[in-house]
Amino acid sequence: MAATKSPIVFIGVGEHIHDLERFEPQAFVGKLLGRGDISGLVEKVKDMNLDQNKNLIKNLQEGARA
């Protein structure tokens, strides 16, 4: 970045092309410090489309009671 003066847009989190994530400085530093990534968790939950998967919600609720 310093040499080209271009921003960091993506960061590799694995060995494959699908292991690229959008670079978010606060989330990145939080992961480094072991605090987790709340915004990433919220995004993953949204991607699960829980409102459209009633069986998954039922299974999660039953698992929480066990």
Image (tube, helix red, strand yellow):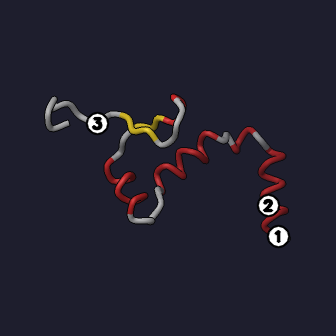
* Disc 2 packing (10 Å; few <14; some 14–19; many ≥20): few
Quarter the C terminus occupies: bottom right
Residue 41 position, x and y percent, is 54, 52
**How many numbered tags mark residues here?**
3
Name the residue carrying label 3.
8
Q: Amino acid type of disc 1?
A: Arg
Name the residue carrying label 2.
61
Question: How far apart, in angstroms, are the residues tagged by discs 3 and 1?
Answer: 44 Å
* Disc 3 packing (10 Å; few <14; some 14–19; many ≥20): few
Residue 9 position, x and y percent, is 33, 34
Left of 42 or right of it: where is 12?
left
Question: How far apart, in angstroms, are the residues tagged by discs 2 and 3?
Answer: 40 Å
Name the residue carrying label 1.
65
Q: Nearer the viewer, mark 3 or mark 1?
A: 3
Task: Name the residue furthest front.
Answer: 15
Instruction: Judge by depth and name the residue closer to the eye, 30 or 62.
Output: 30
Q: Secondary structure at mark 2?
A: helix
